[in-house]
Amino acid sequence: MKIGIIGTGKMGSHLAQHWVEKGHQVMFGSRTPEKAVELAKQFGGKATGGSMAAAAEFGEAIVLAVPWHAAEETVRALGSLEGKTLIDITNPLLPEMAGPDTEIGTSAAEQIAEWAEGANVVKAFNTIYFVNLDNPVFGGKSASMFFCGDDETAKAHARQLGKDTGLAPVDCGPLWMARHLESVGFLWIYLAFKQGKGTDFVINMQRRN
């Protein structure tokens, strides 16, 4: 699969490492294309870099891996996303973790779907910390990758990319369920950083048998 990763941060680069190892083609995009090119060099010729619009055009699936405060400006700079899978991994928190930076009754993913007209938005990867992608096995089981969306093809893309990251995909239903997935992300962040529990844990769906 061709994957455009918008952003040059740790989450996007850790995801990319798994995906290039599985044979996917990755292109990083940045508002500073030189940063994306430099990051791509770390992948030994298995990734490329350029502008955000170029990475969006390149990808069958596009991963929005920028801070929430930059999401709207970024999405509007990507050009036409008609028919493309857009995977939103953001957690829309206010500064100092003061609460969600979204209106009641909606989610970051739903807002992104409004900004990215024609794209098939999926919420995914927002409940696991980038460090845990290096070894996503806890208690002998793969960490859950909760995801949701309205388009089955886009969800299939997200499911496959989750598996290729070593995670266990859990389909949580339509896109409005992102309101709850983002709450799970907030919970993890609060426990890890506000309560000082550290980052070596995940929130999983675990069956009895």
Image (spheres, rainbow, N blue to C red):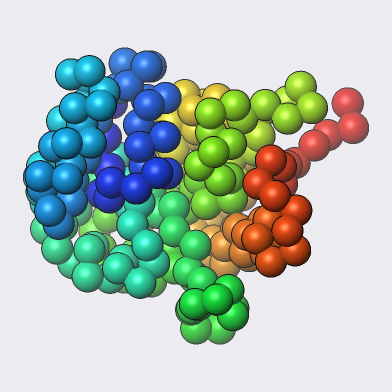
Examine the image and state in which quarter residue 206 appears.
Answer: top right
Q: In the picture shown, does residue 84 fall above or below 163?
A: below
Instruction: Please give the name of the residue rendered at 59% of the width and 80% of the height, measured from the top-left corner.
Output: 98
Q: Is residue 23 left or right of residue 48?
A: right
Determine whether, in the image, residue 102 is placed left or right of residue 183. Answer: left
Residue in the picture at 15% in, 30% down = 48
Q: In the rendered view of the protein, which quadrant contains the C terminus?
A: top right
| Residue 8 drawn at (x, y percent) | 28, 46
Q: Quadrant of the N terminus?
A: top left
Residue at 68% in and 56% down:
192
The x and y percentages for residue 108 are 44, 68
In this view of the protein, which residue sits in the foreground, 178 or 199? 199
Q: Residue furthest right?
A: 208
| Closer-to-camera residue (105/92) | 92
Q: Position of residue 183 (x, y in %)?
A: 63, 65
Is residue 156 among the parts visible in the rendering?
no
The percent position of residue 99, horizontal first and vertical second, equals 59, 78
Q: At 83% across and 34% down in the image, what residue appears?
A: 207
- The image quarter containing residue 140 is top right
- Number of numbered discs on residues: 0
Q: Is residue 158 above or below residue 104?
A: above
- Is residue 51 visible in the rendered image? The answer is yes
Q: Give the farthest residue toward the bottom.
A: 104
User: Viewed as shown, does residue 122 lie left or right of 78?
Assistant: right
